[in-house]
Amino acid sequence: MTINNNGTIILASASPRRTELISLAGIEFSVVPADICEDVLPGEAPVDHVMRLSREKADAVAAKIDGRFFIGADTIVVLDGEILGKPVDAADAMRMLSGLSGRDHEVITGFTVFDKISGVHISRSVCTEVTFKKLEEKEMAAYVATGCPMDKAGAYAIQGGAVHFVRSINGSYTNVIGLPMTELYEVLQTMQAVK
């Protein structure tokens, strides 16, 4: 099933996981990655950070190509109020995973849908609580050695090699993958981007 839309939908993301999620919903769209600085601003709260980046991504792509609806998104892992971005190296990935071991943390995604014709932005954030089992040093090292954690916020992918690290989730599963699909779909319906 493919859902026709009232104008072109563009996903402003290089994430294959977000591409797969939107495809699973049967939405017609194109992918144009955004190229913006993703640094955290001084004093910026985690939710404010993902909301700002999601809008900047949507706007950056809308400024350079044709289309009507532009979707920007950013996902972070937050442990004890600290944003865990993508690890800079294997040691950093081990540090992050060690911190998450046996603990609860939050995965927060901010997303924005920008209607280039009307100029309207709708942004939302979704938070999911994730609990990790206690991780052994050897299983963390084996996972890091695969290279999988290196382009993932918090150094893990729930749908990948870390699937057995997660004891429970409270909230949206697709949010932990990188895009809260129920909430995104509701916004697209509100904007009449899908019918």
Image (cartoon, rainbow, N blue to C red):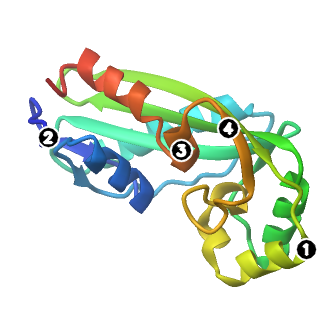
Q: Residue at x 40, y 35 (%)?
A: 181
Q: Position of residue 166 (x, y in %)?
A: 72, 51
The crowd level at tag 4 (other Cα within 10 Å; few <14, some 14-19, many 20+) is some
For marks 4 and 1 on the same chain, the one whose residue lies earlier in the sequence: 1
Give the structural element (helix, strand or loop) at label 3. Answer: strand
Q: Position of residue 154 (x, y in %)?
A: 72, 56
| Identity, as a three-letter code, of the amino acid under mark 4 | Ile
The crowd level at tag 3 (other Cα within 10 Å; few <14, some 14-19, many 20+) is many
For marks 4 and 3 on the same chain, the one whose residue lies earlier in the sequence: 3
Q: Position of residue 155 (x, y in %)?
A: 71, 63
Q: Nearer the viewer, residue 69 or 97?
A: 97
In the displayed orientation, state which residue is furthest to the bottom: 145
Q: CA distance from mark 4 to mark 1?
A: 23 Å
Residue bearing the label numbered 4: 169
Give the structural element (helix, strand or loop) at label 1. Answer: helix
Q: CA distance from mark 2 to mark 1?
A: 47 Å
* Label placed on residue 137: 1
Q: Position of residue 10 (x, y in %)?
A: 25, 45
Q: Nearer the viewer, residue 66 or 167?
A: 167
Instruction: Say whether marks 4 and 1 touch (CB < 8 Å).
Output: no
For marks 2 and 4 on the same chain, the one whose residue lies earlier in the sequence: 2
Give the structural element (helix, strand or loop) at label 4. Answer: strand
Which quadrant of the view contains residue 62?
top left
Which quadrant of the view contains residue 19?
bottom left
